[in-house]
Amino acid sequence: MRQIVLDTETTGLEPTEGHRVIEIGCVELVERRLTHRNFHRYLQPDREVDVGAVEVHGISNEFLADKPRFGDVVEDFLAYCRGAELIIHNAPFDVGFLNHELRLWGGDSAPAIDAVCTITDTLVMARQMHPGQRNSLDALCKRYAIDNTRRDLHGALLDAEILADVYLAMTGGQVSLHLGSEADQPGQGRERRQSVRRLSNKRPPLSVVRASERELQAHAERLSAIDQASGGACVWLAEG
């Protein structure tokens, strides 16, 4: 399973108003593991970057002056993404801009990015998982305890890296214990067997710490409060 976590930065908000992509950042996941085979390009948009956009991402016209154009990198970009699942936060924005760039490059014969890849929108996922709550990338970082202290300004690669962590947390985390066959990851089967052999069977049994009477009483009071607040729908009491 190959997934690409993607983000873009642009000169403004609407491709229909002539705004362009100025940064593409992609982070690769294979079998839910970061591969560090990232794709990152800054692009010369052949137009001015809106002042409001510069305030968001800090990418200036002067910085972009000597950067390649989208047409210079598009074949590498499509080869990198082809056949993968794209993970994007607020996908219609990025997909709209990428498809606009593809049409400018290749006309009507250019492929749409959502024809080259499947698309998963983490904003839609977050709204389904956390209805009625804030689901911006910063809000999700706070909810899932993801470090985003480097995010003073938006940046496509940085935001893609952060979104990769958020996505793994939203979908169950990055599992370190791999239970597949040795053929799944060549060369790793021996390492797993060696790790298992290092665990001694002479270890003492795990201690069992039982709740005190005070803790049991506090637990019962908490369940009672939940049951009252939910109109008698506390599932823990029902199961008890």
Image (cartoon, grey):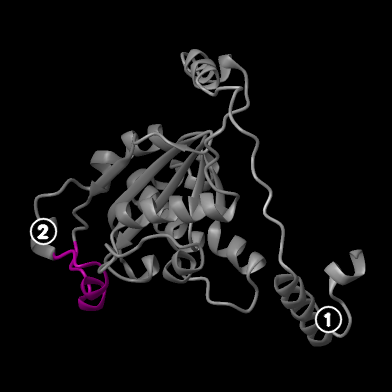
- Looking at the image, is mark 1 or mark 2 earlier in the sequence? 2
What is the quadrant of residue 34 in the picture? top left
Left/right of residue 196 with respect to residue 77 in the rendered view: right
Residue type (three-letter) at the residue carrying disc 1? Asp
What residue is shown at x 22% (from left), y 51% (from top)? Answer: 43
* Residue position marked by numbered label 2 in the rendering: 63
Q: Residues within 10 Å of mark 2 (few under 14, many from 20)?
A: few
Left/right of residue 175 with respect to residue 233 in the rendered view: left
Q: Nearer the viewer, residue 72 or 85?
A: 85
What is the quadrant of residue 7 in the picture? bottom left
The tag on residue 37 is none
Image quadrant containing the N terminus:
top right
What residue is shown at x 27% (from left), y 40% (from top)? Answer: 73
What residue is shown at x 67% (from left), y 54% (from top)? Answer: 209
Asked if residue 20 is among those painted magenta in the image, a careful observer would answer no
Residue 210's spot in the image, x, y percent?
71, 57
Residue 115's spot in the image, x, y percent?
54, 42
Q: Which residues are magenta?
A: 47-60
Q: Nearer the viewer, residue 34 or 213?
A: 213
* Residue position marked by numbered label 1 in the rendering: 227
The CA span between labels 1 and 2 is 59 Å
| Label 1: element kind | helix
